[in-house]
Amino acid sequence: MHFEEKILTVRTDPLHATGIDILQVNMGYRCNMACKHCHVQAGPAREEMMDIRTVEEVLVVLNENRVKTLDVTGGAPELNPFFRYLVEEARHAGCRVIARSNLTIFYEPGMEDLFDFYSRNSVELIASIPYYREADVDKVRGNGAFRKSIDALRQLNRMGYGADKALNLVHNPTGAFLPPSQSAMEKEYREDLKRNYDISFHSLYTFANIPIGRFREFLIRSKNYDKYLRKLTDAFNPETLQGIMCRHLVNVGWDGTLYDCDFNQMIGLALLDRYPRNIRDFDHHLLAGRQIAVDDHCYGCTAGQGST
Ligand code: SF4
């Protein structure tokens, strides 16, 4: 059964947003890594990057002060030359700023002061580290990725991240299976990272891999696509519908196009026709109660304990 129909078996109406707590901005698809399961298919050769005009349009929306949180993502958002300007201006506008970091970015040329920049601007970090064992991380991210991530986490801890500054981690499974219980996995990460590396963090989020991008290609190549989708549909949990991110945020693509979430952005599934399509036409009232554009990849957000 398609996701759209499935929703109507547990609700009387299609999915709608319940407000806009967060403006999630994708600054571009360039990244210093090319992880095997990246839903963005990001990498060093990607050229899509948000320009200054679009950044200014994002700031116009934030300065209206009705959306209180900016969530910056990519690729590696830090590689966008206007990233720091956006963060600083958003902080001046009184916004809470969250950045999604891959941790290895701290060791790229030109990023020497990134730790200080984040700390100075009280940016909250959501850092992805697929697992707490070196071999598993390097298999997905490339040799040396785990060591750099550990070094970055230690340095962040020294600066107060994981204590008075927010540091949350993200775990994705490395294959065609659902993530284990978030609380059990958080306990494992916490104990292992503390014991072996003296690292602290606040919370761990476990996300199912959404079957799009490189992960979809991997599933098709390994003949696991149908099986994985069946796993997701069988695990559909209506209780996750309240918390899925599309109901609480608007996502902005690198070119200013608006989406219901970053996953929809990656498959080019725009907002439904009756809503503004670009950040320059942002209309808080219309967007806060909009109907969400869904498709079968949405089963990835609603399987088991949910993924957003
Ligand atoms: S992929 Fe997830 S967050 Fe995006 S529209 Fe579907 S259910 Fe919502």
Image (tube, grey):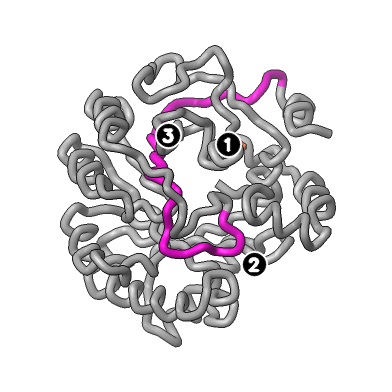
Which residue is depicted at the point 27% across and 47% down? 83
Q: Number of callouts in the render? A: 3
The answer to whether mark 1 is within 8 Å of ligand 1 is yes
**Labelled pair 2, 3 in contact (Cβ < 8 Å):** no
251 sits left or right of 4 in the view:
left
Label 3 packing within 10 angstroms: few (<14), some (14-19), many (20+):
many
| Circle 3 residue | 252
The answer to whether mark 2 is within 8 Å of ligand 1 is no
236 sits left or right of 122 in the view:
right
Spatial CA distance of label 1 from label 2 is: 22 Å
Q: Amino acid at mark 1?
A: Asn
User: Residue 125: within the magenta?
Assistant: no
The magenta segment is: 12-38
Question: Eyeballing the image, is 91 above or below 176?
Answer: above
The answer to whether mark 3 is within 8 Å of ligand 1 is no
| Circle 1 residue | 264
Lower position in the chain sequence, tag 2 or tag 3: 2
Residue 91 place in picture, x, y as percent: 20, 42
Which residue is depicted at the point 73% across and 61% down? 176
Q: Secondary structure at mark 2?
A: loop
Q: Amino acid at mark 3?
A: Val
